[in-house]
Image (spheres, rainbow, N blue to C red):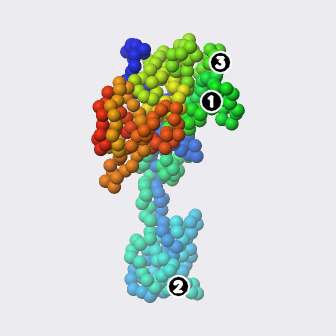
Amino acid sequence: MKEMSIDRLIPADEALGIVLENARPGVTEETPLLQAAGRILAEDLVSLRTQPPFDASAMDGYAVRASDVSSTPAILKSIGESRAGMPFEGSLQAGETVRVFTGAVVPENADTIIIQENTTARHGDVEIHEASPAGKFIRKAGLDFGKGETLLQQGDMLTASRIALAASMNHATLKTHVRPRVGIIATGDELVQPGEATGPGQIIASNTFGIHSMVTDCGGEAVNLGIVADEVAALTSTFEQAISDDIDIILTTGGASVGDHDLVKPVAEQLGFRFEIAKIAMRPGKPFLFARREMSGRTVFLVGLAGNPVSSLVAFNVFAKPLIRRLAGFPDHAAHPVSAILGRDLGPNDERMEYMRATLETNQDGTRIVTPFDKQDSSMLATFVRAQCLLVRPANAKASPKGEACKIIMLD
């Protein structure tokens, strides 16, 4: 990292590059299938078996030789049954049939299945009323996949269907990237937990809970380190606890500005963190801290968000989320903006990039129409709930008419 002044207002795009520079996924681990949801596969996955491993019946009915039912009705001798897990031992000869059930092994010499609706069983014989062509209702061995076939790739997120496929491939555990541990600290004498009575000048620490949820959603392991008073000793102790507990990212809300009681930066510097960002040319979210501490083979990151709820949520989506996803092994790291058109006129923007909460509609032709709310104050959390996206307005943008092309960041 080249040396630069952190006192300047850093453009948002440059700040994202600083946050992601040299951030790499951590160690890998073997993860049981039932714990693998949402994790990122750390290696290609090869099937250990063929699926299905044998020719299997796709229906309940009778296994026959197609040559025996070339004309119907036909009377065949029933010589046994094949059901799932208990195959018929033997082979069909001319004029014979075997009762089969869905998923059962197709007996040797049988080459088609007659569904039971087209048969009548009586006194050890079966009358075939309507024939099926050769191969009908038989799932051939290897129809789905074969042993040794690579079916999942490194970097795949383990969704429900991929985990089910891995199980079918006979893998009990999967090598995945370790989830980055994110320690969340709410700072401020004014904060109280939800459900508690508030005193004069106190507010609810809402940021912790929204950020905790977002950390989990984007692939991290959220660790709530509680509310810390605006005291050097208390904040120092909490930081030291986070470091000793193998936290990968210390994420603070509040205390990121330059007031007398904003202690995150000075305390972290005393503990050996090297700061690279102190404020960003963006709205909302200008107060933003980013630092690293290198220690015995690992890096501890510090992300300091503003105390205002919307500022913290916007900055999390723009900077913290890409960092967590990169450390978790996701191949698509940044929150890439997508194209849309404006749903209303907008005035000119100032020297800071703006992230405006907005609603989103999609036309039948796929065009996205984005309409930002009139009120964008960073304390207004309710409008964030109603927003589907953030409209990204470049610094010094000119007035923009309705229908003009723009960029947005989707919100989950």
- Residue 375, position as x, y percentages in the image: 45, 36
Residue contact between numbered discs 2 and 1, judged by CB atoms under 8 Å: no
Q: Amino acid at mark 1?
A: Ile
Mark 3 falls on what kind of element? helix
- Residue 302, position as x, y percentages in the image: 52, 22
Q: Amino acid at mark 3?
A: Ala
**Of residues 154 and 132, which is closer to you in this image?**
154
**Of residues 47 and 21, which is closer to you in this image?**
21
Q: Amino acid at mark 2?
A: Thr
Is 151 placed above or below 399 here? below
Give the mark, 3 or 1, whose residue is nearer the N terminus. Answer: 1
At label 1, counting other C-alpha atoms closer than 10 Å, the crowd grade (few under 14, some 14-19, many 20 or more) is some
Which residue: 42% across, 28% down?
Answer: 283
Does the image show residue 376? yes
Mark 1 falls on what kind of element? strand
**Of residues 146 and 220, which is closer to you in this image?**
220
The circle drawn on residue 203 is 1
Measured Cα–Cα span from mark 2 to mark 1:
76 Å
The residue at which mark 2 appears reads as 120
Q: Is residue 108 left or right of residue 341?
A: right
Q: Nearer the viewer, mark 2 or mark 3?
A: 3
